[in-house]
Amino acid sequence: MGLNLKMMLVVAHPDDECFAFGGALALAADRGVETYVVCLTDGQAATHRGHATSAEELGKMRRKEFAASCKVLGVTHYELLDYQDAQLEFVNVSRVAGRLVKRMRRFQPDVVLTFGSDGALNTHPDHMIVSMLTTAAFHWSGRPSRYPELGEPFQPRRLFTLTSDFVLPGRQAPLLSPWTTVLDIGSVRERKMEAFRQHVSQAPLMERTRGIFEKHGGREFYTLLATTSPQPAQMTTDMFSGL
């Protein structure tokens, strides 16, 4: 069913892959799509720290949790890079985008996913920056003039960013992008939650958000941000339709 289709997701922290994108990843796995998740940090600045007694110990713990979550979701390939949690706004944009370009050219995804520029429901600066880095890499990957030393140009066909149909109560609302794609994740909803349960260090966060998932957890919302051919915006329920 996958017809050799590929999906690449770029996130900032361990647990982003399931908390935000778990439905899309699990649905893709179920239809035979090859998936690749790149996470930029190991989450050492997290508020919830489990039994870790140091940032380094928490980072090691969260790396293992990330791997376990990806396995539950059926992710084909996953990788966690070495940037500092809560410090992505200070990275060298060209250098980090180049690392993503290298991976896009090697993996050659049809569809790329990442956060929206709003930073998601918690407006996290790291989410905003990973959105910008991934967007730049999506465009630069296909350009011969950009990073010619990093392999032959390859242009992914679609870039989707995460959005939402609700905001968190009691917090300043993000400026969310209008969605173009709504995924019904009912068939994989429990798998998404099981993946989040692998992040044992973040158990208090899961407990705090349980009601939100119960009310809103049946769908994921995305914006089709870029494509390889000009076209009008249209509502879809399948990221791979027509590919």
Image (cartoon, rainbow, N blue to C red):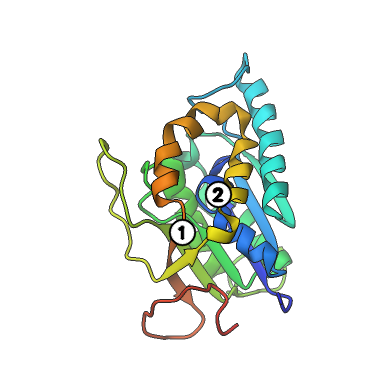
Which label is found at residue 11?
2
For the residues labelled 1 and 2, the Cα–Cα distance comes to: 16 Å
Height in image: 75 above or below 170? below
User: Quarter of the image containing the N terminus?
Assistant: bottom right
Q: Dividing the image into 4 quarters, which one contains the C terminus? A: bottom right
Q: Quadrant of residue 63?
A: top right
> Does residue 119 lie above or below 90 as drawn?
below
What is the residue that sits farthest to the top in this orientation?
Answer: 53
User: In this rendering, which labeled residue sits more in front, label 1 or label 2?
Assistant: 1
Q: Is residue 175 above or below residue 181?
A: above
The quadrant holding residue 33 is: bottom right
Residue 154 visible to an observer of this rendering: yes
Mark sitting earlier along the chain (1/2): 2
Residue designated by label 1: 220
Q: In which image quadrant can residue 67 be found?
A: top right
Amino acid type at image mark 1: Glu
User: Which residue appears at 59% of the width and 40% of the height?
Assistant: 196
Instruction: Give x and y (percent) for residue 11.
Output: 55, 49
Q: Residue at x 59, y 27 (%)?
A: 201
Q: Against 209, is 74 above or below?
A: below
- Residue 16 rendering spot, x and y as whole percentages: 54, 45
